[in-house]
Amino acid sequence: MTTLFISDLHLDPSRPATTACLLDLLAGPAHTAESLYILGDLFESWVGDDDPSEAGVRVADALRRLSDTGVAIYFMRGNRDFLLGAEYADRCGMRLLPDPCVIDLHGTPTLLLHGDLLCTDDHAYQAWRRQSRQPEWQAALLEQPLAARLALAAKARDESRKHQQGAAEAIMDAATTTIAELFRLYGVERMIHGHTHRPGFHSYWIDARVRTRIVLGDWHVHGSLLRADADGLALLRLPIEH
Ligand SMILES: [Mn+2]
């Protein structure tokens, strides 16, 4: 019984090799898994399910083929693709998950998040997150014509880039106090997330219990895949032919 986790692919027409790497995974090794979890930022930007982007179509076809063979696919929205909706998810054959949520991972309750919820030292970002997750705000945005939404997304990406360059490294990372709060709130000993692009295993000693936080990597230089089975968890790199 194998479960796979990926996040932060940031698929974009400017990096076709990353899309090719994902399509190889979906057509090949992913078939040996029981389920695949995509923990957000699959796409660099998503302005609505009516965007006819080529990557969106190819990825949907590949996910649907995998899902049709019986592999369960779950999707949690990230901060880049938070507008990805039920229509596109249906097309892919994937089920949408709330952020955060707890799953039973081979007998271990495991908290899944995209990861941006943990970056509580970045107050400007958290204010934007609260605004952009409101259903009324999203509905008003989705009513705008596709061209206007694409222009807004390009502007938002520029602003996000400037914000990241201006902010201190530590502010962009997961805050230790928030990590501890969530471990306690959900009563779990393990969490898995992406977003920070700092892959690794981190151990904590909280309330006399060992807790583990596993961070998935992004797909810029190579792909990043967390594989969980009866033998344990392994963070694996996938070569990208740049
Ligand atoms: Mn993210």
Image: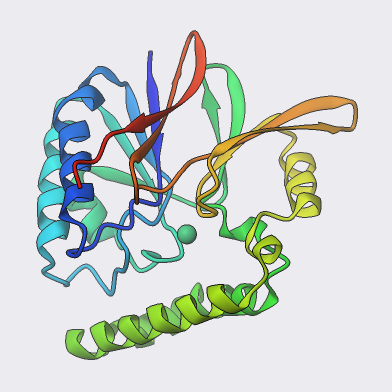
Q: Is residue 30 visible?
A: yes
> Going 40% across and 82% down the picture, which residue do you hit?
158
The image quarter in which residue 6 lies: top left
What colour scheme does the image use?
Answer: rainbow
> Going 11% across and 56% down the picture, which residue do you hit?
57
Height in image: 11 above or below 67? below
Q: In this view, does 173 lie to the left or right of 228?
A: right
Height in image: 82 above or below 99? below
The image quarter in which residue 119 lies: bottom right
Instruction: Find residue 239 and report its horizontal and vertical position in percent.
Output: 27, 34
Residue situated in front as seen by the camera: 80 or 64? 80
> Going 21% across and 58% down the picture, which residue do you hit?
15
Q: Is residue 158 left or right of residue 50?
A: right
Height in image: 214 above or below 95? above
Instruction: Find residue 61 and report its horizontal and vertical position in percent.
Output: 10, 46
Q: What residue occupies the far top of the structure in this picture?
A: 231
